[in-house]
Amino acid sequence: MTFHRVNRRRVLAGGSAAVLGAAVHSSSARAQAFPSGPVTFIVPFPPGASTDVTFRLVAAKLSQMWGQPVVIDNKGGANGIIAAEAAARAKPDGHTLFTTSSMTHAGNPVLYDKLPYDPIKDFEPVTRMSMVPLVMLVHKGLKLKTLAELTALLKAEPGKHNFGSGAISARVAAELYRMLAGVDAVNVNYRNHQLGAPDLASGAISFMVPDLSSSKMILNSGWADPLAITQAEASPMLPGVPGAVAAGLPGFIFTTWSAVYAPRGTAKEIVARLNKDFIAAATSPEINEKLLGMGGPMNPTTPDELRDFTLSEIEAWRKVAKAANIRIE
């Protein structure tokens, strides 16, 4: 009987390769099989809110692509905290996703002392979807034409002018302007931009910085004049209104944004599949045209880019909120 010496290293290497190959095959198969049933989008706002409308459009397209129902679960309230906690605790299989805005993942971590979720540790980033600028609107009776003229007026009359905030993002944007311009003005809070618009029309408040879609509603009423958009470039949505750089205040850059996150622990191959499909759906001609009309073009990212972007946005909000002492009890 003849015995052959076995090359143990070669056997182990071959076994490891086989295991690795099986794992890769399993991961690939799992991604290809996804989704295996209905997918739920948890939205932290009530039906009809801009984030809700955005993701309903995308959901309809994804349902066609996947051949599975996509259900919208609106969990409004508490500035999105209720929805964020539910999404963070969901099963990490890709079938429950958090389709949210900058409020839950940049604002809340700064404005609240304690949250029942962590925007970084409890979620796997999938993709950013949109970035929508805000617009500096001023009371028409002031007859101001440029951002520099508003700054000059506020410096000449410190503490005599009010500004309105119909959303926390608008408050932060207005405070950013005050910091950069070195002016003094008093904040007046409203439940939404629509409730603040009549006071802007009457002159009870001198300016406000609502998002682009709300700005268009106010401008269509003829109650205000637009001075600048809080991004570097002008927007085709508001022809003739300069971006912050052209308006003479380069640092006045602030946007609201929407993004998709999955619960922590969702497999990387599922996240990659979601990233690819969300981008394909949102940039499809029929969906992108509708979303463009709502405030801005799609601005998708890779998962890693979204993670870095989220961290940078948290720091941007923190800087302004700390300087202006903005907190939510």
Image (spheres, rainbow, N blue to C red):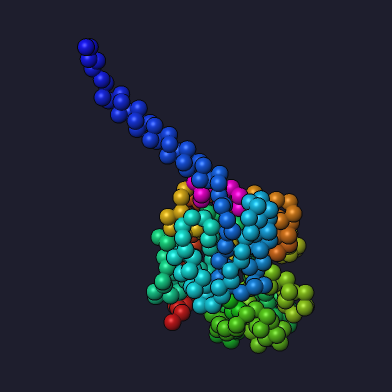
**Residue 150 drawn at (x, y percent):** 64, 75
**Residue 177 drawn at (x, y percent):** 56, 71
Q: Residue at x 46, y 79 (%)?
A: 328
Is 141 drawn above or below residue 266 in the view shown? below
Give the residues drawn in magenta, as a range.
269-278
The part of the image, by quadrant, that contains residue 227 is bottom right
How many numbered discs, if any?
Answer: 0
The part of the image, by quadrant, that contains residue 217 is bottom right
Q: Residue furthest front?
A: 1
Classify residue 290 as left or right of residue 66. Answer: right
- Specify the quadrant that holds the C terminus: bottom left
In the rendered structure, does residue 271 fall within the stretch colored magenta?
yes
Residue 230 seen in render:
no
Q: Residue at x 56, y 52 (%)?
A: 36
Residue 193 seen in render:
yes
Q: Main secondary structure of the magenta part?
A: helix
**Residue 87 drawn at (x, y percent):** 49, 65
**Residue 257 drawn at (x, y percent):** 58, 63
Classify residue 326 as left or right of residue 170. Answer: left
Q: Residue at x 63, y 51 (%)?
A: 66
Classify residue 59 as left or right of residue 239. Answer: left
In the rendered structure, does residue 82 fall within the stretch colored magenta?
no
- Specify the quadrant that holds the N terminus: top left
